[in-house]
Image (cartoon, rainbow, N blue to C red):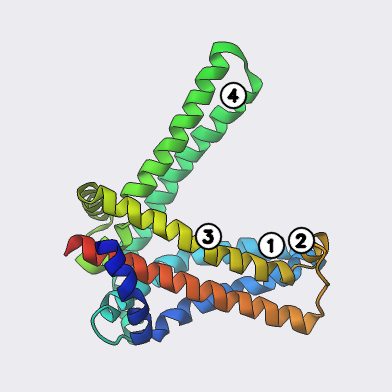
Amino acid sequence: MGVLQALRRTPGALKRAPGLLVPQLIVFALLVPQLLLQSSYPLVSTFYSLGISAVLLLVTPFIQGGMFGMADEALTTRSSLSRFVADGKANYLSLLIAYVLLLVVNGVIGAVGVAAGFGAFLTHGSIGTAFIGLAAIAGLLYLVVAFFVQFYGQAIVIDGASAIDSFKRSYRVVRGNLLATAGYLLLALVIGALSGGVYAGVSLLASADAASAAGLPTLSTPLLVVVGLLAAVIGSVASAFMLTFSVAVYDELTG
């Protein structure tokens, strides 16, 4: 019931804080050149992608903090980009530490899974079976970690938790609301799949190679830019909605 209530509260929060679309729109707009370059200049597109990834690694915690703060305020009253800047600055370090810790943990789990996968491919018999089991355990562990710590950002910004305590706080909230959290995750996956499908379809038009492979007409450069910006708008709206929805769910689960 709390998840459905959170879903009903989300559109109103976005209406009271349209500025939530701005940070995500900027992020997706930065990805447009990569879409436009990947067919004609693949090497340049690759270097651009690497550069943007490095920038986002440093900027994402600030964006997370600002948007969580704005979304939390927008659930009850109007919010503005001044709240975004304030919460982004105030929670940057804690979010960055938690973000890097999570990247390291997931990286280790992923490395174990990949190594086990190669081991299963290269060996046979009981050893190969053991590698398959190890790869399955790594995959399951990744999902469990992602499930239980998914609210760490909300815990930092909304509850003022430290980087380490945010994981503990998220775990306690999820553990105390397993069915509701699973329902939220399922609903989020459905909404994400639908919006992701629309985004992918529009992005397909911005790639000459992909459009040609799908039997679609190749667009002129001005139209490619328009399509790329349209994809950025769709992506920003979907991302802002999902982030606000997650904050509303956290608010419902924590009372």
Query: Which residue is depicted at the point 83% across and 72% down?
Result: 217
Q: Which one is nearer the viewer's eye here, 36 or 58?
A: 36
In the rendered structure, which disc, 4 or 2, sits on the residue that comes first in sequence? Answer: 2
Indicate which disc residue 119 carries: 4
Q: Earlier in the sequence, mark 1 or mark 3?
A: 1
Question: Dot 4 surroundings within 10 Å: few (below 14), some, or many (20 or more)?
Answer: some
In the displayed structure, 113 sits above or below 58; it is above
Indicate the amino acid at tag 3: Ala
Q: Which residue is mark 2?
A: 43
The amino acid type, in three-letter code, at marker 2 is Leu
Classed neighbour count for the residue bearing mark 1: other residues with Cα under 10 Å, few (<14), some (14–19), many (≥20): few
- Between circles 4 and 1, the one closer to the viewer is 4
Q: Position of residue 108 (x, y in %)?
A: 46, 39
**Considering only vertical position in the picture, is 137 above or below 79?**
above
Q: Are marks 1 and 2 in contact (CB under 8 Å)?
A: yes
- According to the image, label 3 marks what residue? 193
Q: Which residue in the structure is indicated by mark 1? A: 47
